[in-house]
Amino acid sequence: MLALLGVMSTVLAITFASAVAAHEIRPAISDVELSEEEVNITIKLTGEALVAGIDLAGLNDTNEAPEAELYDQLRALPPEELADQFRGSWDQIAPGFMLKAGDADVALELGEVSVADVDDLELPRDTTVRLSGTLPSDGSDIRFGWDSAYGPLIVRQAGGGDEAYAGFLENGALSEALPRTGAATESAGAVFWRYIFVGFDHIVPKGLDHILFVLGLFFLSMKMRPLLTQVTIFTVAHTITLAMASLGLVTVSPAIVEPLIAASIVYVAVENIFAKGITPWRPVVIFVFGLLHGLGFASVLGEFGLAPGRFIAGLIGFNVGVEVGQLAVILVAFALVVLATKAAEIKQLDDEELPVRSRDVTFRAIALAGSIVIAIIGAYWAVERVLG
């Protein structure tokens, strides 16, 4: 049993601590403006990754890449120097951009490159790139995308109004066909389904802080009532702030929200160690922490640039995806704990000198070890986020 707990603790520590100081991969956002004769594209992207030549396919953060040191050096450059580096690397970067008019490839020329001035190097900064190209005279529709190594890409067509197409592309995919006159649109149903997967992906595998918090809720008790009570309160709370922040009604700096999210992880883990069930104040505390996590979700959803007419569909889909992700975490944790408790019972039955423990006692031992690991990781995370 002790060996099992040791393995669990080690796996949790290695898995979650590796992402503490991560530079998370964000999707680039491109706006495509078309006329009969030409195309103009404005892209907000992470210029350091492209200049460093990092293959972003399958990465969650740039610290996992062999070029991580070069990436950090580029992060430290003043904005204009990074812009110069991007211009100088354009010949190597350009082949990864793909623009097609019908079946024909369209060459793109690099125009203005500007880099946002960000004081804190731990915060993301955008490089804005403007591209242009001459279109063939056949009036064919346009499809745009880039190489999978450049990471996820959002493609929007200018002039689409409230129902504008905003495709989320991965793995080197191209956008839907964009007409030269008018604009591509997308149904609310299509947006809803797509953002279910976006929300799930933000929990599993990218939402390591939210996974830790949900595990903290689970480790208080395996009984259905306390677990459902906690998860329901957390869901209601983060839904409120996710909607309010996404609509621009509430704005809180990530520099405040992210350390507090880490602190919430520490709190639930520490309380698990000393409490035997839901305390009178725990529901209130979970509700407050849920509000904080909703603000964290909103910062992610805001990166996708949904059209106003499809915002509600995307918001609901994203929230459904988050809930499915949380449920998946709980189900996996439940299954693993059940397997561990059964293994412990078999081991004790084989040893005639040891009394057979109840499942509650076995779960308590597992929950104690898991909560200690979560508390340590959360505390380190909180300090790291405060100190940068």
Image (cartoon, rainbow, N blue to C red):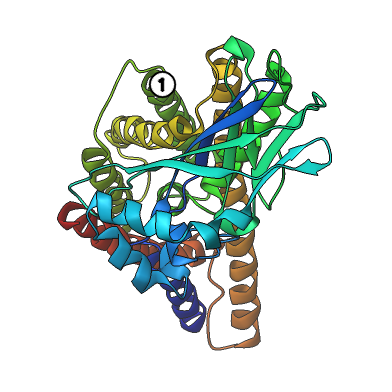
Residue 96: % across, % down: 62, 55
Q: Are there few (<14), some (14-19), or many (20+) residues within 10 Å of tag 1? A: some
Q: Write the residue at 58% across / 11% down.
A: 161
- In screen coordinates, is 157 left or right of 65? right
Q: Can you say whether 267 is above or below 238 in the image?
A: below
Q: Write the residue at 39% across / 34% down.
A: 299
Residue 95: % across, % down: 62, 57
Residue 14: % across, % down: 43, 73
Q: Write the residue at 53% across / 60% down.
A: 91
Q: Quadrant of the C terminus?
A: bottom left
- In screen coordinates, is 200 left or right of 114? right
* Foreground of the two, 107 or 3: 107
| Residue type beneath disc 1 | Ile
Q: Can you say whether 4 is above or below 365 in the image?
A: below
Q: Can you say whether 102 is above or below 27 in the image?
A: above
* Foreground of the two, 135 or 312: 135
Residue 128: % across, % down: 40, 40
- Do we see residue 153 in this rendering? yes
- Do we see residue 269 in this rendering? no
- In screen coordinates, is 108 left or right of 261? right
Q: Which residue is mark 1?
A: 240
* Foreground of the two, 226 or 69: 69
